[in-house]
Every structure is written in C-alpha cells, then in structure tokens.
Image (cartoon, rainbow, N blue to C red):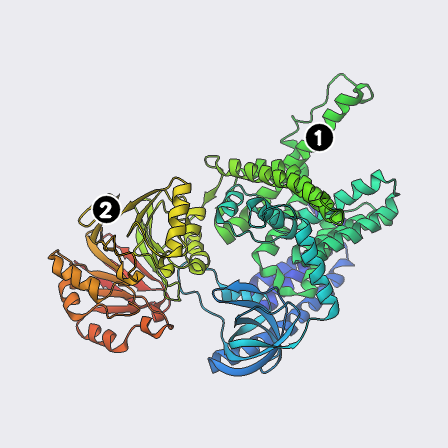
Amino acid sequence: MRRLLRRSVERHPLLWVAVAAAAAVVAVDGGYVAGWLALAVAVGIPGIVGLRAIPPAALALALAAAVLHGQRTLPQQAAQCWIEAAGASSATVTARVLSIPQATGGGWSALVEVRAGGPAGKVWWRGAGPAAAQGETIAADGLFRPFPEPRNPGEFEVGNWLHRQGAWGVFEAQGLARPVAPPPRWARAGQRARAGFRAAVTAGLDPAGREAAVIRAMVLGENPDDDALIESYRASGTLHVFSVSGMHVAMVGAIGWLLLKLLGVPRRPAVGLILIGMLAYAWITGMKPPAARSVTMAAVLLGGFLFRRRPDLLNALGLALLAALLVDGHLIFLAGVQLSFGVVLAIGLGTGRASRWFGWIDRKEPYLPLPLYGWWRTRWLKFREGTATALGASTAASIGSLPLTLWHFGFLSPVSILASPLIGLPVFLLMTLALLAAALSPVPGLGERINRLNGRVANLCTGIASSAAAVPGGSVNFPRDRPGADFLIVYDPGHGGAAACLHDGGSSVLFDTAHRPGFRRIVLSSLRHMALRPESAVLSHPDGGHLGGAVEALDALPLRQLMLPVERARSQSFRALQEAAGSRGIATTRGVTGRAYGISPDAWLEVLHEPDPLDFHAVADERVMVTRLHWHGWRILFLSDAGLRTERALLESGRDLGAEVIVASRHRQDASLGDAFLAAVKPRAIVAGHADFPPEERVPAAWQAACEEAGIRVFHQGRTGGVTLVPREDGALVIRGFLDGGELVLRK
C-alpha cells in the first residue's frame, strides 16, 4: 500500500498539491471539519511515504489559495451583511457590465461591478429597456436588495449561485440605464469578432431553426431556446455537448493537429500553433471557465512534447485545479466545475481499467503476427482499439460522474455510456465543418454550402440523442425533497402567474403552468428536483400568466392530454398552445360542467363552471374554468382569477360548492371571494395568490383580516411562497407555507 501511494504521489505531485489547496479553500469557506481533514490527508500522505519536499510546497500553496479566497469573500460577506441589515436601500449607482446581458421579462439582467454608489464588488443588475453592452459602464437610480430566497420547493437557489459568482446583492434599476462610457476598444473588437464567428457558423441556415440552434449550442455553448431539444440530450446523458468544455477544446486541438500534420509542419512548432488555436477558440467563445481550464491542461500536456517529457493527464488536471483556486476559489463550489474536474479525474484513473471490459473488441489474431496483418486488417484493428478506448473512457467518465450527478441533480443516465462515444464522431465532424465554414466565410456562397451540410450533421447528432433518450430505463430521475408520498404544491411564480402540481398514486397533474419565465425558472426546476413527470395538465383560463409556459411544458414534460377552458381565445399564448398540441398529436378536451375526470383511485376532478365558449372577446379573467379536486376525502376548489361575475354564476347554478380549501388568485378588474360566496363554499383555508404589481392583484389586508376573524386561515403567498398540502395516514390534511413554515392541520 505504501509503495502504491508513493508511486501515485511521485507521478502526480501537482494533483496532491491542488487537493491540499482545495481543502484549504473549503475550510476557509466554512467547511471546517471536511476541509481540515482533507488538508491533513493531502499533506500527510506525501510525508508518510517519504517524499519530504511535497508537504511544504502543498502547505505554502494551500495557504496562498486560502488567503486569496478569504480576501475575496470577506468584503463580499461584509457587503451582504450591510444590505441584509439595511433592507432595500436606494442609491445612484455607476457600474461596469461584466457578463453578457440576459433577456428577462420586459428587461434584462447581468453581473456588474459597482464603481460608485455602493459597496465595491459585484452585484446582479436588473434593468428595463434595451440591454447594455458587455464592458459598458452605465448608471441608474434604483434599490439594492439582498439575494432572493427560494420561494418554492425545489426551486433553483439563485442567491447561492450569485454568491459563487462573487456577487453580494441585487440592484434593481428604476428606469433606463444611462450610458457613462462605452466598452474598451479591445472589448468592442472582441464582440465584433464573436458576432462575426457566430454568424459565419450558421450562415445559410434558418436562424430560428433547430439545426442552427444545435450548431450554436455545440460550437458556441449557447443555450438553445428549445426545451424538447434540451430534454433529448439531457435524457441521453449527452447534454455536455451543449457547452464549450474540455471536449470541444480538445477537438479544436485535434483538428489543428490533423491539419498541421497534412501540411507537414514539424511536431514542436505544431504544438505552439495548436495551443494558440485552442486559446483563440476559448477566447472567441467567451473564455468560459471550462474552456479556460482545458486550455491550461492542454498547455501542460502538450508542453511535455516541447520539453521531451511524458505528459500526464492527472498532473495537468492538478495544475488546472490549482490555477482555478488561485484565480477564484468560488469555482470549486459550482456543480459544473466539480463535474468537469471529476470526469477528467475519473478518465485519468479509470480508463485503463474500464477498457479491459471491452478487450474483446480489439482482440488480436492469436496466431497472426502484426507485420502480416496487411493494410485493411491493420486499419480495422486500429478502429477497434479506438472504439474500445472510447468506450472505456466513456464508462469511466459515467461512473466517475455518478456521485456528483446524483448529488446535484438526482439524475442517472446509464445509456450515456453508449450515447457519448456514438455522438462523439458526429460532434467532431460538426466542429470541423463549423470551423471550416468560418474560415471560408469570405468566399461568397461557400460557407453557406458547408453550413447546410453541417445542418444535416446537427440533425444526425439530435437523432442519436433522441434515440438514446427513448431507450427504456436509459435514464432515471431520483426524487428529492418530496413533502410526502402524495401531495399538492401550489407554486408562487410571481408576477401574477399561477401553477400547481398534484402527485397522487404515482400520477402527476399540472394545474396551469405559470408564465414562461416562471415555468422555466420555478415550476420545471421543482418538477425535475422532485422527479415529477406530469402527463396531464388542466388550464384554467387563456391568460399568459397562467398558461404562458404551456408550450415549454409540452417540450419538457411527457404531457399526453390537456383540459382547456375554451376552444377559442384572443390570447396569443393560448393559440400557440393549441397549434403546438395539434402538431404533436396531444389530445385536448374542453372541460364540461358536471363531468368527473379520474386522476387516481384516490383523486378525481370535477368541473363546476365552464365559461361561455362564444364570448371569446371577453377579458381572460372572465373566462375561468372552475374545478374542484376530490382527493383523499378532501375537496379543493381551484378558482384561479375568477371574479364576482363567475362567483355569481356559480351561486345561481344551485350546485354544491363546498370545499375545505380554496386556491385562488386576484381578479385584475373585479372583486373576488366575497362574503356570499365564502358562505356557500365554507372553506377552512384559502391559498391566496399575490403579486406586488399591479396593485389590483395584491391580497387586501382588510379582506384577509375578515377571513381570519371568520375562522378561515389565509395562506398569503406573498409571505408564504409556495404552499404544500399533504394528506396524512390518520386522515388529516397538512397545509404548510414554504417561506414562513406556517402550518395548519385540518381534521375531518
């Protein structure tokens, strides 16, 4: 054992030093026990096996990494404490835009560096109007706010992500940003080069088509605006091809190597040219952290040729990790960075062992010497050897990424062992054609022809991913943080939207989908976190805040049937949903009053009110389909945005309206949940949706006080966030707010 450890330390000293530095950063960041224990192991083992020179170097670099991380995080934490103590603080801020601005609902957001008007450091800027340019200096009046807390179960923790980007708060600009200084000349030149490269690799293709989206995703790392496409690659375990990672940088290096070899360039000059090409590719794609790490590792590996030393993958990994820690210690806490380093570590440690499992593929003729193989047999042997190595590396990477993938995403894709090497060759061809099209773009028409050919390659890649995703058992989602075996979640997506999900007896049903940003950021994130795959959706009325995310839901979820409130509406979101459902063969039905719709043995849905199907010129809030869920002996009434007119129609119908719980939002132009209606329903709890703007959608304080006085518990979602309802084995129903933890137990 001692001999094996000594050999490992001797062959990979930089890896051990980097592990010591990572442990020190973890300890300084707050993981004291794990950090100091890992540091003791990383420093102690080299000393125990007799390599006395390594522990002092490891301790020195660990101290440097820890001090640098502390120097970055202490001012950040001080600013976070200031904003949390001050609450919303108004200021006139001047800042420089650091990241590429992202479009949000009606505005934009980006990471900026504060120059004046607040504590120095990075904040997340939320602005209105046209987005500023990356590198531009801007100014605006607004409010500093603390990081937003997750308001729903399973919601992506934006605050933690922003903290790991080095930010200390959020700045909400009021009005348009005022330009102060343009981006530096070199930054503008880089933006023009990136824009030209982006246009060159998709010229001749439909900019909004799937082929162009796949090429931009694989070559530039852009996120395609196509949830169905993303889901295919995700389920097949090949979503990593949609980010500029080490694989892409390595492919650029391989393309350069083949080209220079054809041109007869000697090996040592070729190494320098290849490194320049890899660095140029990483720069033109935005110098993302995975690409920067890959260039660092490539420099170490290829540098071995220059100095006539045998390159070592794990040593290169150690240097890249050490460089990342010294530049920004926050990086090692990000899931993508951990997966990137973990996969490379697994490939370095496990490819040799895993390749033995595929030894039957490259088995040689037992009685035929290699010199007698001939040209065809030699090429066939090399192909089989490459296949075995690729399968070994893919297997090692899949096994190595398993713990982190399960920890961070609750996801496992066994089919990726085959899908990853299968898709590797088409991706390499796509990268080659994209670079060739960019290089030949000055020649009229030639780049377009190459891109049209590349579009077919993109379709081939998508076909492989889709076929792998369709393999039964090829991917598995493991549920996390479910509130119970059966439950109902009423989401708080904000901005006047609404959505809920019922899970009972192994089946899941969506009630509305929220608006598009809310579905993507909150609802879909929560569904994936809990491994929920709804096959049915019930839509209350043709309002963008309630069904704006429905088309994305058709892409991302295995929805088979939709219950619609009307057949015709002016809403653009509703018409887009009908068109998408028709093109995909998804069954749609209009809810009919008095009809029961089964969900599970313990749950069924009843339509109490259907809007006038001919009154399609009425506002959306007057076209609400009211439904009542019968669930484990409890009745839950979904009113959505129904107002006084709908409530009067329900009262005049003479039907039994009784329900223990009401789920409702505010009608924008009318009163709702009046005394007569509440007297007919006799609820014991109301989950009340809330929006700060417009003011009409706020929960009235006087109304809430009156309800509480009448013995009706109101879960004000502006304060509770999402609300969960869970039936217990003793027959009780537990209602709990996510933010405040407020709880109500209903008993029959």
Secondary structure category for the residue under label 2: loop
Q: Is residue 308 visible?
A: no
Q: Residue furthest top?
A: 367
Whole-percent x, y for residue 526 in the image: 42, 55
The amino acid beneath tag 2 is Asp
Q: Amino acid at mark 1?
A: Glu
Q: Which residue is situated farthest in the left direction here?
A: 654
Left or right side of 64 for 589 = left
Residue at the image point whose x is 87% and y is 47% from the top:
268
Q: Of marks 2 and 1, which one's residue comes earlier in the chain?
A: 1
Which sits in the foreground, 40 or 450?
450
Identify the image quadrant of the N terminus: top right
Q: Quadrant location of residue 63?
A: bottom right
Is disc 2 in contact with disc 1, using a CB cutoff of under 8 Å?
no
Residue 108 screen position, x and y as percent: 53, 67
Identify which residue is drawn at 73% across, 64% down: 189
Q: Which mark is residue 385?
A: 1
Dot 1 falls on a residue whose secondary structure is helix
Q: Which residue is mark 2?
A: 602
